[in-house]
Amino acid sequence: MTLDSPPHVARHDSLVFLIVCRDGPDAKSLRVSHLDGHLAHVEAHWRRYILAGPLRQPGEPDLMGSYFLVRAPDADDARALMQGDPYVSSGMYAGIEVLEATPSIGLFMQGKIWADPDSIRDRATGG
């Protein structure tokens, strides 16, 4: 396997939010009873999701939550999308954290969003 530099790709044209959901005490039973509705919801809105899936502690078989990387015009819209998911509306999650994220590099993106360090230097401090 050879190492090569990632190609420059366009930055996402919309805001992206990482939503981290931590299971509540009744998550196992709620996950089973709301699975069909959850899958219908994410499939209906699949173009809004960059990635999504379950979370586990390393090496553990049990689920402990979910993550969603979603496209949305703002955080309120991202939260509204999540409220439509039966996993959320059923109270399955004990905590939900919504964070603004910038997909910047990786295989899924097929490259990196910067041409060179100077092209993103102002963003390195949040600009």
Image: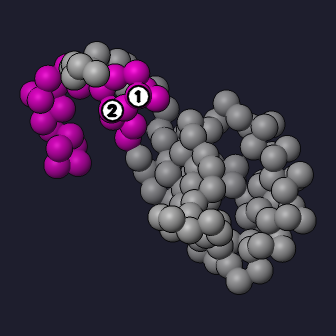
Q: Residue at x 77, y 80 (%)?
A: 26
Left or right: residue 98 versus residue 111 is right
Tell me: 120 left or right of 16: left
Residue 59 in the image: above or below residue 47: below
Quick one: SS at disc 1?
loop
Q: Residue at x 68, y 78 (%)?
A: 24
Q: Is residue 57 above or below residue 40?
A: below
**Quarter-of-image position of residue 10:** top left
- Quadrant in which residue 69 is drawn: top right
* Mark 2 Cα-neighbour bin, 10 Å: few <14, some 14–19, many ≥20: some
Amino acid carrying mark 1 in the image: Leu
Q: Secondary structure at mark 2?
A: strand
Q: Nearer the viewer, residue 95 or 35?
A: 35
**Foreground tag (1 vs 2):** 1
Question: Which quarter of the figure has residue 60?
Answer: bottom right
Spatial separation of the CA atoms under disc 1 and disc 2: 7 Å
Which percent across, then down, holds residue 12?
44, 28
Picture layout, residue 61 above or below residue 75 = below
Which mark, by number, is residue 105?
Answer: 2
Q: Nearer the viewer, residue 11 or 21?
A: 21
Type of amino acid under label 2: Ile
Mark on residue 107? 1
Residue 121 in magenta stretch: yes
The answer, for residue 34, to whether it is visible in the render is yes
Residue 39, horizontal then vertical, whole percent: 81, 47
Measuring from the top left, give residue 68's x and y in whole percent: 58, 50
Can residue 103 be found in the magenta stretch?
yes
Provide the residue span drawn in magenta: 102-127
Q: Quadrant of the C terminus?
A: top left
As drawn, is 5 to the left or to the right of 64?
Answer: left
